[in-house]
Image: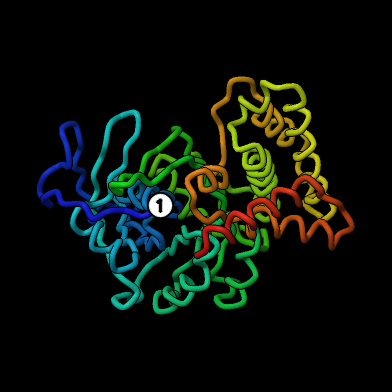
Amino acid sequence: MSAQNASTPKDEPNSVGDKEIAASTSATHRSADAPGRREKPLRFLIVGAGAVGGFVGARLAGAGYDVTMLALPRSAARLREGGLRIASGDGTSVLRPAVVTAAELTSGYDAIVLAVKSGDLTGATADIEPAVKPPAVIIPFLNGMAHVQPLTSRFGSAVLGGTLRIATELTSDGTIRALTPQFDVELGELDGSPSTRVDRLAAAFKDAGADVTVPGNIVDAMWVKWVFIASLGAVTSLMRAPVGAIAAVPGGQRFAQSVLAEAAAAADACGHPVPAGRLHATEQVLTAPGSPTTSSLTRDLIAGRRTEVEAVLADLAARARAAGTATPLIDLAVLALRIHNQQIGS
């Protein structure tokens, strides 16, 4: 969703009730491997100033971390003028982290958070090249798994695995609205090895208010999330309705269960079976009566925006076919969303 430039003076909250929060860069945090020792906080570069990146950047900045937002020139001007506006049930907060464009970017960051749409990955990887210098690591919070290979091919062991679960949207005035309190993060080395750098990053996200997990196998965790978002996306985008409306009609719950079964079978065939408990939890979400839950695919579809059908659904279906597993309902969702993307153009 496009954002309009804010016109509020820099030294005032944007509206009555807004909270202006200085993004401190002077805070120190206790070192995990040296009790009693204090060290400078990690420096974060957030790539993507939309609903996802803006939310993550604001939470890290609010926790006292040194945060810089990498944005396109138009978005950079908006952020410099109006700051990051985060609206939730507690009101609207305004934070003012540093902002750079790709032409201004240099090195010196500890962590680079990639929070862009899958279609913007190629441009983003080119943009961050000057910043990917040791000890910088890359945390990709993208949907699906298609981003892993191009990132590791270009940046090698600097790339970590990660998942992010939030529900946010960018409003027409540039405000990032948190739709639920959820802020869940999973981090890990792609090879599953123990990692001090992952531990430091996990501590930073905990400081920022996230519920953080460092699983033994981050790739498996990424597949678990993929099965969830693919199932939810296919179900709600095909029906153009939230979960509760689908569950309320005869056959609705059975349809949702069938889509989930396809996604789970795909993951299993690809060597990443979803644990039974996680499948049951996903089924409960997909079949909950009265639930307003929908997906970013569906919100983009209904709003007339391009969807991430290739990364979320098409890639999963293609991997399933290669592994000998059929996904007819997911294939149908792929077809519908590809037609939508073609009709609205780029």
List x then y, in percent, for residue 313. Answer: 68, 53
Give the percent coordinates (x, y) of residue 32. 44, 51
- Tell how many labels: 1
Mark 1, Cα crowd under 10 Å, few <14 / some 14-19 / many 20+, is: some
Q: Residue at x 84, y 59 (%)?
A: 321
Q: For this rendering, which residue is in front, 65 or 323?
A: 323
Q: State how the image is colored.
A: rainbow
Residue appearing at x 26%, y 36% in the figure? 92
Residue 216 visible in the snapshot: no
Q: Is residue 42 visible?
A: yes
Whether residue 296 sits left or right of residue 83 in the image: it is right
Measuring 28% from the left and 76% from the top, which residue is drawn there?
A: 104
Q: Residue furthest right?
A: 324
Q: Disc 1 designates what residue?
A: 1
Residue 89 point in image, percent of width and height: 34, 28
Image location of residue 77, percent across then percent down: 23, 63
Q: Is residue 302 left or right of residue 4?
A: right
Q: Nearer the viewer, residue 118 or 1?
A: 1
> Which amino acid lies under the numbered mark 1 shown in the image of this protein?
Met
- Residue 150 vs 115, above or below: the answer is below
Identify the residue shown where x is 18% and y is 42%.
20
Q: Secondary structure at mark 1?
A: loop
Task: Decide which of 229, 57 is in the foreground and name it.
Answer: 229
In the image, is residue 291 above or below residue 54?
A: above
Location of residue 316 by image quarter: bottom right
